[in-house]
Image (cartoon, rainbow, N blue to C red):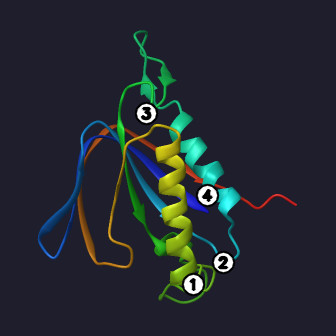
Amino acid sequence: MRLVVQRVRSARLCVAGEEISRIGRGLVVYFGVKAGDTEAQAEACAAKIATLRVFSDEAGKLNLSVRDVGGEVLLVSQFTLYGSAARGNRPSFTEAERPDRAEALYRHAAEALRDLSVPVRLGVFGADMQIAQENDGPVTILFESEKKP
């Protein structure tokens, strides 16, 4: 799984002009699923999101997690995170998981976050989404979860 995690002051997700999800202070997480990824990886990603220390403490150090600050997560499925433009100008998405399996893992990660006491809002899997976010910092972290042998 490949994640792009952005610290935000707020974010809003719409589909066809209709607001679907909104968060205040927290994280927008773009969530890509690679062919062959597992439930265990989705759970590990949820744990990483819940505990990633990207919020400042009283001393200005990045020492607090989204849970520590009472923040929220907007979890957005994004198969294009596995797009490769290594050959040609049109990205290839052959590494991305099949939609049915990717959606199941995306929802599994959301449930794992909820089990970790993190409020989660979702996008609409497979939809053309418009996302407005006010980045904070900016702070952007890239995370990749590989299968363990």
> Secondary structure beneath disc 4?
helix
> Secondary structure beneath disc 3?
loop
Q: Are marks 1 and 3 in contact (CB under 8 Å)?
A: no
Q: Is residue 118 above or below residue 61?
A: below
Question: Percent x, y for residue 119?
Answer: 37, 42
Dot 1 corresponds to which residue? 98
> Secondary structure beneath disc 1?
loop
Question: Percent x, y for residue 4?
Answer: 48, 54
Relative to residue 82, is residue 136 drawn left or right?
left
Q: Quadrant of the C terminus?
A: bottom right
Report the Cα–Cα distance between label 2 and label 3: 29 Å
Q: Residue at x 52, y 44 (%)?
A: 115
Dot 3 corresponds to which residue? 66
Frontmost residue, 56 versus 33: 33
Residue 35 - label: 2
Q: Residue at x 60, y 51 (%)?
A: 45
Location of residue 147 (image quadrant):
bottom right
Q: Are marks 1 and 2 in contact (CB under 8 Å)?
A: yes
Residue 42 - label: 4
- On the question of residue 32 being in view, the answer is no
Frontmost residue, 96 versus 68: 68
Q: Amino acid at mark 1?
A: Arg
Question: Percent x, y for residue 120?
Answer: 38, 49
Q: Earlier in the sequence, mark 1 or mark 2?
A: 2
Q: Earlier in the sequence, mark 1 or mark 3?
A: 3
Q: Earlier in the sequence, mark 2 or mark 3?
A: 2
Q: Is residue 109 above or below residue 50?
A: below
